[in-house]
Amino acid sequence: MHFYKPKDGHGLAHDPFNAIIAPRPIGWISSHSSDGTLNLAPYSFFNAFNYVPPIIGFSSVGRKDSVANIEATGEFVWNLASEALAEQMNLSCSAVGPEVDEFALAGLAPAASHEVAVPRVAEARVAFECRLSQLVQLKDSRGSDIESWLVLGEVVGVHIDQRLIVDGVFDTVGAKPLTRGGGPGDYFTISEAARFDMRRPQ
């Protein structure tokens, strides 16, 4: 077994942490500043955390524009990053100033939401409109603040492309969600060949 203490370094060509906790769904988050400037950014530390009410969240390593915007407005939208939108998602990750609209930068259209003022990505086949429920600065095991923020939001509106609903069930394979792996640029999607059925024990 290769063993290391993270504080001492991993001794490998690339940090294995992201490659082990993988693949990870992508939090493609749209927000806007208090003056209305749009922002769109992908986060690979993202997941769902509760059913009722539905709560999703992402972690921002560094206090980025998304965090500042959501703190100011209390709203954001999660957009499904799919295989068809991979290039646009990647463009929205560009290191640009807060005055830059990543919708425009990536050639994407903003679409009006129903429950929040923040627009969703019109081209995304699924979107969750969210209201901020908690904003938490993470701490290490000694209780010291670290430069990462966990953003949790209650889902208050859901948009699903009708073609992804088959016999009343969401077609995850058909949605072709893009997920993040390890390495500097590893991404994955899913296929029917990778599916298997396993029910919970009664």
Image (tube, rainbow, N blue to C red):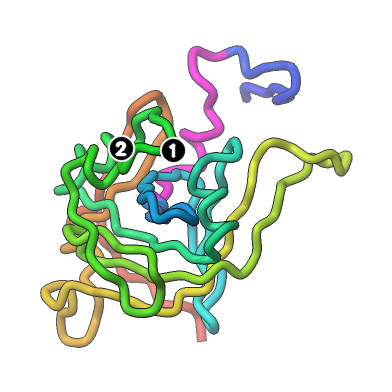
Q: CA distance from mark 2 to mark 1?
A: 26 Å
| Residue topped by disc 1 | 98
**How far across and down, in percent of the image, does residue 80 sit?**
29, 58
Residue that protrudes farthest toward the front in the picture: 35
**How far across and down, in percent of the image, does residue 128 sit?**
37, 69
- Residue drawn at (39%, 63%), measured in percent from left and top? 77
Instruction: Say which element carries label 1.
Output: loop
Which of the two discs, 2 and 1, labels the residue nearer the N terminus? 1
| Residue topped by disc 2 | 187
* Membership of 61 in magenta stretch: no
**How far across and down, in percent of the image, does residue 181 sit?**
39, 37
Q: Could you say which quadrant of the image residue 11 lies in?
A: top right
Q: Could you say which quadrant of the image residue 50 lies in?
A: bottom right
Instruction: Relative to 113, say whether 29 is above or below.
Output: above
Q: Amino acid at mark 2?
A: Tyr
**How far across and down, in percent of the image, does residue 182 sit?**
42, 31
Instruction: Relative to 115, say whether 10 is above or below.
Output: above
